[in-house]
């Protein structure tokens, strides 16, 4: 592996990792507030991308309004999902609620398949397609948008959670729902906000990545899985940890292709990622039981 | 007197009627209608393949009957819709064989359905010409005595790419393929057949269904001496490969599979689609191919006939597969010397066996998908050069070689 190649693996890994990070953020927010792992998270990413294509290409809207509208629609669908699928079953166990999210994912994917068909599409680039030379490596302008957007979303989310009333209430719910309730935080409203916020972030991921990665009605499955791994690496604890988890996963995947280490070729890219996930889940579950014992 | 007249008129009428009906039955005995079955997926997942196949068969049947039939025998093709469902397809195949007593069957549309009816066909001992791609439909040929097919397989497509690469003196290539069905089958053939053309595979990269980037794999290829990249996947994965090669500013040529012969690939890959070369049937670039090409006239005629009936721009490759299959059955029926195959169960079985033998001996048949030389060892028999190398230039398919 030459130095130029190494740099290229890092850049490609960082790009993919940023996408995983955005998906992982959504998982983390909903988990923190409701303890639900939302397996429909990948579908919001799909919705963002497909909607932006429909609005910008089929409906002919200018790019910026099309993007904003796509994210808003994704957020609205997240809120609707909470109101009509999760809230009515709020007294069920968390496992049941997680199964409901799988049902919602299949439902959204089915509708999308009917609506848009099985063909894949590419929404327009945000800033051209001429790749930029960065020392010995190349980066696509859209990849810069992806990395930049992830950075911006992470910073804004951190500011929102730390310095606004709603953000602090969300954080309080995450830390101790009962105590938050006692001081007047409405857990149901917070859950609604968490779902809408997570769907919006998923939608943002979808609109920014689709021009580079192409999109179709079924991209949510694989991206949801990768985002779940990212959130797991981050321990489902903090948004920053999810972002670090996503970028780590992207870089591990990318470097594992270049490693040429024994039998480990590109065929094992996802195997390596899943082994990382298994190791983390094993360690994490050990830590969880300790926490529960302490609590 | 009046009564006598009435009776005699009635008697005359009866005699006339008997005479007419006797006359009718005697013509039926003389010229039997040849019945052929067809199984197409005109609804369901493969309907965009099945519909042009059905359209083609209806058109060809009319053409043949208007021209006086096959040696004077009218042709009837009984077409059933399997709804892209393999269980339904098996039921309908049985119906064609036992109830409709057809002499041969063409179709099914999909590989899955074709494989599903192999046993029914083999047990019933009736010739089948499939319109589906998978090589497993006709191989191992020893177990596929009754089964033929007309569309090219990955092996023919890869052969065309390798022959072209050898002709432009490219010997070191990198391959990149999807780990799912289509890509994996292609990868195995790419690796197996490279030696035959003096080609060395210097890098063998894969990606998974649903992967959104192949930059890492391409970076790896960039570190080798590969002079060309051959990508084996359907349109989406191939488009990502084309886009990422552009991002990484790789300037070696990209060759793709026949799976990218659709507008979605060009739309998604945009400018990066330009320069991509792939093998495909000549139908989609019929106007570009030189007049010296032996298929030129057949292709032009088929395209023109089809578009007169079904509208401009409606022609597609899948209808061509059905055209080839039906024409081969018709050629076999022309050689049939059993006057009435429906006389008894034995004559029906003899006719089916005779048709099978004739199909196996077809050589030099100039069809839509290619030129066919059937033999006992090869139930596709597509001659090299049947596929064109097509290059995408300014977002359009153009004949490359």
Image: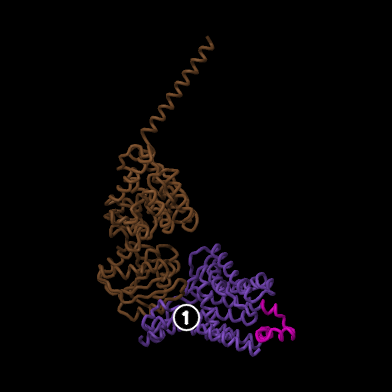
Name the image quarter holding the N terminus of chain A. Answer: bottom left
Q: Kindly indicate the quadrant of the structure image that contains residue B241.
A: bottom left
Chain B drawn colour: brown
Q: How many marks?
A: 1
Residue A181 belongs to magenta span? yes
Residue B200 picture location, percent across and down: 28, 74
Position of residue A240 in the picture relative to residue B170 (left or right): right
Residue B167 or residue B32, whichever sits in front: B32
Q: Nearer the viewer, residue A257 or A63?
A: A257
Measured along the vertical axis of the image, is residue A145 above or below residue B199?
Answer: below
Q: Position of residue B169 (x, y in %)?
A: 25, 71
Along the line of sight, the residue nearer the viewer: A216 or B82: B82
Q: Which residue is mark 1?
A: A273
B313 inside magenta stretch: no
* Residue positioned most to the top: B1
Q: Which chain is purple?
A: A
């Amino acid at each position: 592996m030459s130095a130029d190649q190494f740099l290229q693996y890092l850049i490609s890994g960082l790009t993919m990792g940023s996408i995983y990070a955005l998906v992982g953020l959504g998982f983390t927010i909903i988990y923190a507030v409701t303890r639900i792992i939302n397996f429909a998270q990948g579908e919001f990413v799909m919705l963002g991308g497909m909607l932006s294509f429909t609005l910008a290409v089929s409906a002919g809207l200018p790019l910026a309004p099309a993007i904003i509208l796509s994210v808003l629609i994704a957020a609205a669908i997240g809120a609707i999902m909470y109101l009509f699928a999760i809230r009515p079953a709020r007294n069920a166990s968390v496992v049941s609620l997680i199964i409901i999210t799988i049902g919602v994912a299949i439902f959204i994917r089915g509708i999308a398949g009917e609506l848009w068909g099985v063909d894949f599409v590419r929404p327009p680039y945000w800033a051209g397609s001429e790749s930029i030379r960065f020392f010995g490596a190349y980066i696509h302008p859209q990849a810069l948008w992806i990395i930049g957007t992830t950075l911006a979303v992470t910073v804004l989310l951190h500011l929102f959670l730390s310095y606004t009333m709603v953000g602090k209430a969300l954080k309080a719910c995450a830390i101790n729902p009962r105590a938050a309730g006692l001081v007047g935080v409405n857990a149901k409203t917070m859950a609604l906000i968490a779902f809408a916020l997570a769907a919006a972030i998923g939608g943002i991921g979808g609109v920014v990545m689709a021009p580079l990665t192409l999109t179709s009605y079924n991209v949510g499955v694989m991206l949801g899985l990768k985002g779940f791994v990212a959130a797991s690496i981050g321990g489902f604890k903090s948004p920053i940890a999810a972002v670090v988890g996503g970028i780590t996963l992207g870089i591990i995947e990318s470097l594992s292709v270049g490693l040429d280490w024994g039998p480990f070729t590109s065929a094992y890219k996802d195997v390596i990622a899943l082994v990382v996930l298994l190791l983390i889940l094993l360690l994490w579950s050990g830590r969880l039981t300790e926490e529960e014992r302490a609590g | 007197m009046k009564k006598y007249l009435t009776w005699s008129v009635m008697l005359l009428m009866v005699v006339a009627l008997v005479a007419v009906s006797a006359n009718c039955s005697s013509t039926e005995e003389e010229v039997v209608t040849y019945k052929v079955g067809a199984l197409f997926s005109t609804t369901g997942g493969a309907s965009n393949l099945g519909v042009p196949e059905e359209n083609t068969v209806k058109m060809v049947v009319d053409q043949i009957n208007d021209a006086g039939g096959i040696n004077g025998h009218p042709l009837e093709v009984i077409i059933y819709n399997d709804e892209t469902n393999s269980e339904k397809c098996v039921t309908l195949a049985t119906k064609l064989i036992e109830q409709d007593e057809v002499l041969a069957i063409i179709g099914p549309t999909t590989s899955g359905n074709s494989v599903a009816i192999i046993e029914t066909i083999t047990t019933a001992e009736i010739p089948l010409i499939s319109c589906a791609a998978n090589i497993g439909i006709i191989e191992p040929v020893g177990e596929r005595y009754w089964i033929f097919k007309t569309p090219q397989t990955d092996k023919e497509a890869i052969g065309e790419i390798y022959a072209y690469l050898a002709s432009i003196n490219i010997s070191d290539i990198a391959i990149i393929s999807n780990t799912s069905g289509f890509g994996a089958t292609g990868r195995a053939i790419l690796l197996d057949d490279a030696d035959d053309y003096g080609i060395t595979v210097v890098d063998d990269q894969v990606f998974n269904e649903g992967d959104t980037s192949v930059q890492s794999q391409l970076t790896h290829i960039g570190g080798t001496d590969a002079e060309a990249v051959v990508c084996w996947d359907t349109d989406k994965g191939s488009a990502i490969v084309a886009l990422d090669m552009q991002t990484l500013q790789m300037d070696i040529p990209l060759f793709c599979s026949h799976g990218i012969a659709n507008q979605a690939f060009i739309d998604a890959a945009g400018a990066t689609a330009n320069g991509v070369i792939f093998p495909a049937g000549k139908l989609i670039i019929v106007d570009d191919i030189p007049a010296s090409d032996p298929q030129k006239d057949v292709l032009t005629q088929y395209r023109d006939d089809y578009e007169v009936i079904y509208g401009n721009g409606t022609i597609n490759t899948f209808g061509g597969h059905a055209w080839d299959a039906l024409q081969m059955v018709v050629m076999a029926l022309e050689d049939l010397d059993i006057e009435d195959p429906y006389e008894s169960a034995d004559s029906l079985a003899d006719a089916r066996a005779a048709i099978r033998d004739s199909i196996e001996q077809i050589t030099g048949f100039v069809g839509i998908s290619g030129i066919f030389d059937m033999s006992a060892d090869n139930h596709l028999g597509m001659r090299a050069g049947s596929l064109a190398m097509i290059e995408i230039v300014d977002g359009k398919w153009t004949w490359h070689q």
